[in-house]
Image (cartoon, coloured by chain):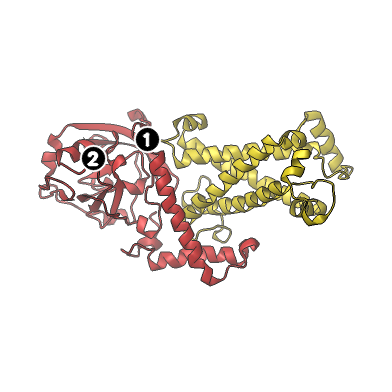
Amino acid sequence: MNDPRTLAPGQDRGLAQPERRRFLRGSLALGAGTLPLLAGCSISDEPLVEKALLQTSRFNDRVQAWLFDPEKLAPTYPDSMITRPFPFNAYYRESRVPQVDGERFRLQLEGRIADQRPWSLAELREMPQTDQVTRLICVEGWSAIGKWGGVRFSDFLERIGADLEAKYVGFRCADGYYTSIDMPTALHAQTLLTLTFDGQTLPARYGFPLKLRMPTKLGYKNPKHVEALFVTNTYPGGYWEDRGYNWFGGS
Amino acid sequence: MDSDVRLGWSGSVGENAPPIHPLWLRITHWLNALAVVLMVMSGWRIYNASPLFDFRFADEITLGGWLAGAIMWHFAAMWLLVVNGLIYLGVNTATGRMWRRFFPVSPRGVVNDMNAAFHGRLSHADSRRYNSVQRLAYLAVILDLVLLVVSGLVLWKSVQFPLLRELMGGYEIARYVHFFTMTFLVAFVVIHVAMSLLVPRSLWHMIRGR
């Protein structure tokens, strides 16, 4: 995920050009001889392969939404099982982690939300807090156990008068990252708008001032440094999702 | 064998004897081969993103170009593997072919046939009858594929399949199960392909049916 080759920006819905070429090279190698069965594929067929794969990924989004059980909880662990040190992970090096001024920070609210008044950290800390020790699973395969604490996201969405019938909740982050999730996952009991990690104020490397933590989704679906969230019925995509990673990213 | 005839294809060959491998079996066999190649090659690329051991698979033998592409291939080919596999298991069980071809299989039979094979005395006169080593190998690879799919389900959806997750001993252990069942599968494929080339008639049977 922190592969430096994937740093190229690209905000379009399709795959960004460098990724696109790399993606095609893989399927091209397939056609060129690794797999004699498909040796007939000419280059003009490659977009068809890519289109079929992207459509299957969309289909897998629907399957995952169908499989998702709002009542099913991710396993929780004792504090003794917390992974120390907990790994840092982003699409940039740790030295480039954004430094956000907590005093001046205001969480921006947009879209299908009745009360769009921005929230300070102090106000968020006044809401009922909860914490949990869960396993973060990265799309790369590795996993690590951490302890996150903060506001139950469903409480927060209700409090701000979000349209809970809407399809998506989108996030914009101080590091340029962005992602979006489905409403059922947003309302899951273990989905937290976190302010702390391991009992301490969320450190910058783990997403200060706010990280949305969902043990029911892969790591890249858990945005750090959240500075704005919006509720919408229009598919918002995401940083990695727009580059070809599966949108639902459920676990 | 009646059911083989019913479901099989006697087509243009013009012989009355039922095919050694009915059409449905040949189709599911080759679709499974395709699915396995796609799953293994894309899986190696996914492995490379976070290797369990101190080695990586060469990029040239992987599929997908990068992690996102490999995952797209893996989670597309999984449908082919699973749907085709369920059809194979379903028809194989319903027609009784599984029972006729793979059983009985006894330790003594396996040892005897293994010995015979090493001394070049294993007969291939009757292609309709699997020897004990074949029976054991084919049953083992079916079980291996089941385990491979189950451990894969745990990696894909460890929260949604808690029973399977606990059966596997948790997410991290499921990664190792997934890796070693893949290793067994690849070892099987290597030997399977080598054997079919040693007895080319068997390869022809899997293509033409007889």
Name the colour assigned to chain B in the rendering. Answer: yellow
Residue plotted at (45% across, 45% down): A141
Specify whether residue B54 is in view: no
Q: Which residue is mark 1?
A: A69
Identify the chain drawn in red. A
**Above-or-below relation of A26 to A102:** below
Give the amino acid type for the residue marked by disc 2 in the picture: Thr
* Picture coordinates of residue A231, whole percent (x, y): 22, 49
**Above-or-below relation of B41 to A47:** above
Name the residue nearer the viewer: A160 or A35.
Answer: A160
The answer for how far apart the CA atoms under marks 1 and 2 are is 22 Å
Left or right, A63 with respect to B88, comes to left
Name the residue nearer the viewer: B21 or A154.
Answer: B21
Residue plotted at (79% across, 46% down): B20
Residue plotted at (71% across, 44% down): B7
Name the residue nearer the viewer: B110 or B91.
Answer: B91
